[in-house]
Every structure is written in structure tokens, then in C-alpha cells.
């Protein structure tokens, strides 16, 4: 797919290990595009956060950090204020017309992401995760972890986050129709070891139960 080729070419000399995640990664795992995608996501280790941000800034991206309550701030501001926790960034082009600012409050801005299909490289969301001693930690619960040789899968020239890990993240918003689609499309395509890891991780994340593990 041209968009993924453009992404690989754009990041080819970034001195940081990155992996495709989100819905695009599910489709790469499946070997075909099964739905329209609103954005493209990659994951990077927290240890490489600043190098990643510097690289993307050098490529001309505008970069904001979501810091809770629907607020965005310039990433440089967030880096200087440790009280503003963030674990992902939005990278977009200056003329982006799919992110609408609804209001501003000092350095904070409140935006609306316009529903659309991403067909060109005009937006990248980077999600930061703890990766340490060849272990990938689920950002929402560090009791859930997976070896990096299982967490990342090489597909042709691109590395993806394993689908069972992606589904774990998507489970937090399981009523989203796109996330439901991704779950239905891939859950029965997982090898037994990957399926068993997913069920175990879901049981830890949701001790009271979850619709995806009835």
C-alpha cells in the first residue's frame, strides 16, 4: 500500500526503532486492507521519545501532545512541564484541514478530529510504550507484558506490533465499530500461543469480565 510505503520511506533514517500499530497493523498482519483507516499509528519506546520527536520536528511536522481532558499542547511545552503527562503525540502538517480547533485556553487548545479516511502521509500518531530488557509492557497495566520477539512481527519491510497486543489496547473502547471489526477480523487468525496470551492479558486487565472474552 502506497501510504505504508511512504511511511517507511519517510522514517527510513530515524535512529529509533519503531513499529506500525493500530488498525493498519492488523491489516498488514492479515495481508489485505479490510476497512478504511482514519489515521496511521506507530509505537516507539519511551526511552527514544525525545530522539523521535526531534527527528519528526526536523521533517517539518507540527507536533502536539494530548494531556487529558481533550486538551492538546505543543510537545515542547509538555516536555518542559512534567505535570503534563502524555504517552502519545499527534504529528500533522501545518495545512491539515482534518483537525479543527474548537477553542483555546492559554497554551491549551481543544480540537476536533474530523472523520475521514487517511490516504496520504499527512498525520502520524506516535504511541510511547515501556520497552525494557527485551520486554514490552502494556502501557495501561505493567503487570501485562510480552517478550519483544513476540511483541513485534516483521512483515516484508515493515515491523508491526503483534495483533493480540493491539486488540488489548482496542479493548478499552470495544464498542467502537472499527475496533469491533478488527477484533472479528483477526481473533480467529491468531496462533494458539498468541490467542492464549490475549485471553490471559484480558483476564488480568478485566478481572470482572469483558465482552471479548465471554
Image (cartoon, helix red, strand yellow):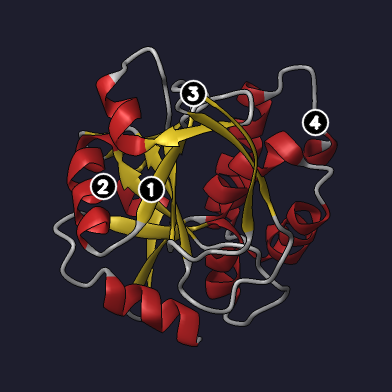
Question: Would you identify the image quadrant in which residue 103 lies?
Answer: top right
Q: Which residue is mark 3?
A: 106
Q: Are marks 2 and 1 in contact (CB under 8 Å)?
A: yes
Label 4 and label 2: CA atoms lie apart by 35 Å
The mark nearer the N terminus, 2 or 1, is: 2
Q: Residues within 10 Å of mark 4 (few under 14, many from 20)?
A: some
Q: Which residue is mark 4?
A: 210
Label 1 and label 4: CA atoms lie apart by 35 Å
**x%, y% of residue 26?**
59, 64
The mark nearer the N terminus, 3 or 1, is: 1
Q: Nearer the viewer, mark 2 or mark 3?
A: 3
Image height check: is 19 above or below 74?
Answer: below
Work out whether residue 131 or residue 7 is closer to the camera in this orientation and state it. 7
User: Going by the image, does 9 lie left or right of 30?
Assistant: left
Work out whether residue 178 or residue 86 is closer to the camera in this orientation and state it. 86
Secondary element under disc 1, as helix, strand or loop, is strand
Q: Are marks 3 and 1 in contact (CB under 8 Å)?
A: no
User: Going by the image, does 55 lie left or right of 78?
Assistant: left
Image height check: is 159 above or below 138?
Answer: below
The mark nearer the N terminus, 2 or 3, is: 2
Secondary element under disc 3, as helix, strand or loop, is loop
Label number found at residue 63 = 1
Image height check: is 71 above or below 6?
Answer: above
Label 3 and label 1: CA atoms lie apart by 17 Å
Q: Residues within 10 Å of mark 1 (few under 14, many from 20)?
A: many
Q: Which residue is mark 2?
A: 53
Question: Would you identify the image quadrant in which residue 98 lies?
Answer: bottom right
Amino acid at each position: 500500500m502506497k501510504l505504508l510505503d511512504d511511511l517507511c520511506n519517510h522514517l527510513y533514517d530515524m535512529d529509533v526503532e519503531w513499529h506500525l500499530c493500530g488498525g493498519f497493523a492488523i491489516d498488514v498482519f492479515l495481508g489485505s486492507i479490510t476497512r478504511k483507516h482514519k489515521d496511521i499509528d506507530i509505537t516507539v519506546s519511551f526511552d527514544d521519545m525525545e530522539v523521535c520527536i526531534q527527528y519528526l520536528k526536523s521533517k517539518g511536522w507540527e507536533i502536539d501532545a494530548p494531556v487529558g481532558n481533550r486538551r492538546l499542547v505543543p510537545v515542547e511545552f509538555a516536555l518542559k512541564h512534567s505535570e503534563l503527562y502524555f504517552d502519545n503525540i499527534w504529528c500533522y502538517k501545518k495545512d491539515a484541514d482534518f483537525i479543527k480547533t474548537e477553542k483555546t485556553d492559554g497554551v491549551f487548545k481543544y480540537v476536533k478530529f474530523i472523520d475521514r479516511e487517511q490516504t496520504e502521509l499527512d498525520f502520524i500518531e506516535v504511541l510511547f510504550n515501556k520497552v525494557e530488557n527485551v520486554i514490552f509492557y502494556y502501557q495501561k497495566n505493567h503487570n501485562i507484558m510480552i517478550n519483544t520477539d513476540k511483541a513485534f512481527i516483521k512483515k516484508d519491510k515493515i515491523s508491526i506490533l503483534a495483533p493480540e497486543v493491539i486488540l488489548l489496547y482496542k479493548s478499552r473502547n470495544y464498542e467502537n465499530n472499527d475496533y469491533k471489526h478488527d477484533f472479528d477480523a483477526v481473533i480467529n487468525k491468531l496462533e494458539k500461543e498468541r490467542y492464549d496470551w490475549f485471553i490471559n492479558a484480558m483476564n488480568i486487565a478485566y478481572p470482572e469480565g469483558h465482552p471479548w472474552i465471554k
